[in-house]
Image: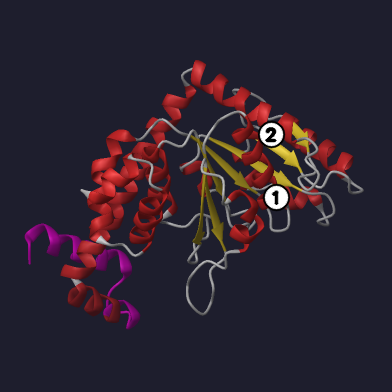
Amino acid sequence: MELVEGILKKDKKTAARLITLIEREDPKAIDALKKLYKHTGNSYIIGITGPPGAGKSSLVNELAKKMRAKGKTVGIIAVDPTSPFTGGALLGDRIRMQDLTLDPGIFIRSMASRGSLGGIAKAAYDAVNVLDAFGMDYIIIETVGVGQTEIDIVKVADMVVVVLVPGLGDDVQAIKAGIMEIADIFAVNKSDREGADKLVTEIEMMLDLSQKEFDLKPPIIKTVATTGIGIDELEAKISEHLSYIQNKGLLEQKRKEKTREKFMELIKFHISKMIFQEKGDIIETLLKDISNKVIDPYTAMEKLLQSIIKGE
């Protein structure tokens, strides 16, 4: 198959084309992904998340340069906000990373979030497998920057760097929910600003008060992405964390959990799709009855299940 051969030969144009087909939900993409799956599992997947304005793109830009300086290849999936007019990515990250685009060892793809509340485009999961089969040493996923709900990254990444900045108002309120729980490393970016030390102290306090049991307590790195300050330390801590979880067997365990979750999501998605396609008329009738209080939602659900089981 042309798409599969192109990916295994590390052809960037083929990778770009396949990801486009994935976004369009083209059946050719599924066929290619099936054949490529056995070639995946060799890349380290790093999630970069955090609130809007934290400087995630600049940080990814500098991090990729450091990895390339060590001879590593890097795939970057930058999830951008969705255009309200076309549904496509606004391409802000691609513009900020344009100095990397000519590097043969780097592949950058902007993807539209398409309303995803978890900060990850649905197609990004499959795009990761494309770049993994392509042979990238590292795959960096930069999430769209939607705040505390942006925790879906943990479902696809081997590790997560949470990027925070001083001066966002009430820093503790900004970082205390879900997003705190997924961090393997904290990067306090724009740390040349006033309040950086205060933010570091607040993160340390919250980690001390957290009920989460850490395999490795998240380090806090002060960075200034625009000048490269702290990037060496951040890259070193990422390598250290990946080595640690691999040596302890935690990486394999985490990937098994992610595989299970992805499989369950696929089942739910396709069963739901099949039910709506085959039982659309029954569902519409039940919805009307629910709206008119003729039946309650729970009994309606039971009736639908009975209809499916009996093959009516």
Q: Residues within 10 Å of mark 1 (few under 14, many from 20)?
A: some
Q: Which mark is residue 202?
A: none
Nearer the viewer's eye, disc 1 or disc 2?
A: 1
Asked which quadrant contains residue 191, the reply is top right
Q: Is residue 135 left or right of residue 66?
A: left
Tag 2 residue: 210
Q: Residues within 10 Å of mark 2 (few under 14, many from 20)?
A: few
Asked which quadrant contains residue 278, the reply is bottom left
- Taking depth in this image into account, of 227 and 45 the one nearest to the observer is 227
The part of the chain drawn in magenta is 289-312
Q: Amino acid at mark 2?
A: Ser
Q: Secondary structure at mark 2?
A: loop
Q: Main secondary structure of the magenta part?
A: helix
Q: Secondary structure at mark 1?
A: helix
Quarter in which the C terminus is drawn: bottom left
Task: Classify 174 as above or below 162.
Answer: below
Label 1 vs 2, first from the N-terminus: 1
Q: Amino acid at mark 1?
A: Ser
Label 1 and label 2: CA atoms lie apart by 29 Å
Asked which quadrant contains residue 269, the reply is bottom left
Q: Position of residue 106 (x, y in %)?
A: 53, 44
Residue 296 falls inside the magenta stretch: yes
